[in-house]
Image (tube, grey):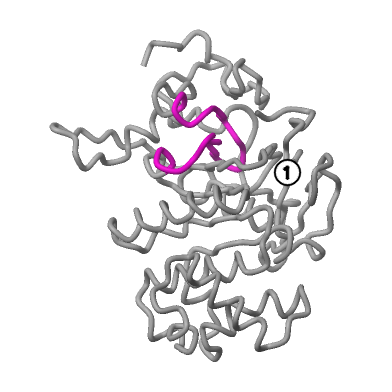
Amino acid sequence: MTGPGAPDDAVLSIRDLHVTFPGPRGGVAPVDGVDLDLRAGEVLGVAGESGSGKSLTLRAIMGLPPRGGSVSGDLRFAPGDGPPEPYSPAEVRGRGISMVFQEPMTALNPTMRVGDLVGLGPRMHAGRSRAQARAEAVEVMRDAGIPLPERRARSWPHELSGGLRQRVVIAAALASRPRVLLCDEPTTALDVTVQRQILSLLRRLVDERHMSMIFVTHDLPVLGQLADRIAVMYAGRIVEVNEARALLRAPRHPYTHALMHAAPVIDAAAERLEGIPGRPPDPRCFGDGCRFRDRCAHARPECAGAPYRLVDSGAGAALACIRSLELAGVR
């Protein structure tokens, strides 16, 4: 759950996270007060439309905001068995916390062979020789389900398929044995079969390596295959958090409900998609009140002045909607 105190088993705890860019009328904050906790051994899914701030949140955790962006907030990480402590992104990046980026071709240096790319982490962070790093790279490539890893280690990135390139990116992120893995929509550009394989691979690696993972996507049904808990993000803020099964079975925030009904279900007998009217607000003019109100079928005048509060609603769930109790079971 989210809240003022992190759970006892949290490995990553984020409070009041902001990513701010300079603007003509002051700072623009597309990530605006995010609270998140990641527990040991957990897969936390973060879902929302494009532009909701999901990827920026991951980049802020890594200390890699886009040019001109600044990060503020209370960020804590537990490298061992103790409670999370404030961390310097530069100290944990690629060691305690690693990231899998969305587009593997932009994440892979085209001038380096695959084995050298995967072995870069052990060389930089563990002081391995080139030969030792290459041997470790082959092993982690095997763990990542890359066939013939010794041969693939000598390949160039452009010689691999999209699915294999994504596995290489995953292997490179795992080579330094991080405790936390951040995944920024790593299956978006892959076909459905390869996507399912990558999701299964990530779940297996989390379990076998006793890692924790944050997986960002715009596709809520994908998280049903992977996540233990889901946080839904809209216009730079978390609007709902719950256990994955409970959230997918009975979404409580109007935005979560709308997002689920806008997603296609391939095996549905009579599929009827319900698009979300309008578009997300511009971060330059978020204004006061609920940021979803202009697109919400249940909005009332009081929503325009409602303060943002992510309230604990019991059983590990949290919600940011002043009408949540009133709307329960009304969908």
Q: Residue 178 at what x, y percent from top left?
A: 68, 59
Give SS at disc 1: strand
Q: Residue at x 37, y 34 (%)?
A: 260
In terms of depth relative to the viewer, which is nearer, 30 or 176? 176
Task: Give above or below for 322 relative to 201.
Answer: above
Q: Do we see residue 264 in this rendering?
A: yes
Q: Looking at the rendering, which quadrant does residue 271 occupy?
A: top left
In terms of depth relative to the viewer, which is nearer, 5 or 67? 5
Q: Is residue 50 left or right of residue 21?
A: left
Tell which residue pokes out farthest to the left in this image.
269
Q: Which residue is mark 1?
A: 11
Q: Residue at x 65, y 47 (%)?
A: 31
Q: Do we see residue 73 in this rendering?
A: no
Instruction: Say if the magenta span includes residue 287.
Output: no
Q: Residue 211 at what x, y percent from top left?
A: 62, 50
Q: Residue 194 at what x, y percent from top left?
A: 32, 61
Task: Give above or below for 225 relative to 317.
Answer: below
For the N terminus, which image quadrant?
Answer: top right
Q: Residue at x 71, y 52 (%)?
A: 19
Span colored in magenta: 223-247
> How packed is label 1: few (under 14 Cα within 10 Å), some, or many (20 or more)?
many
Q: Residue at x 14, y 32 (%)?
A: 270
Q: Is residue 100 left or right of residue 81?
A: left
Q: Residue 318 at what x, y percent from top left?
A: 61, 24
Three-letter amino acid code of the residue under disc 1: Val
Q: How many marks?
A: 1
In terms of depth relative to the viewer, which is nearer, 200 or 242? 200
For the C terminus, which image quadrant?
Answer: top left
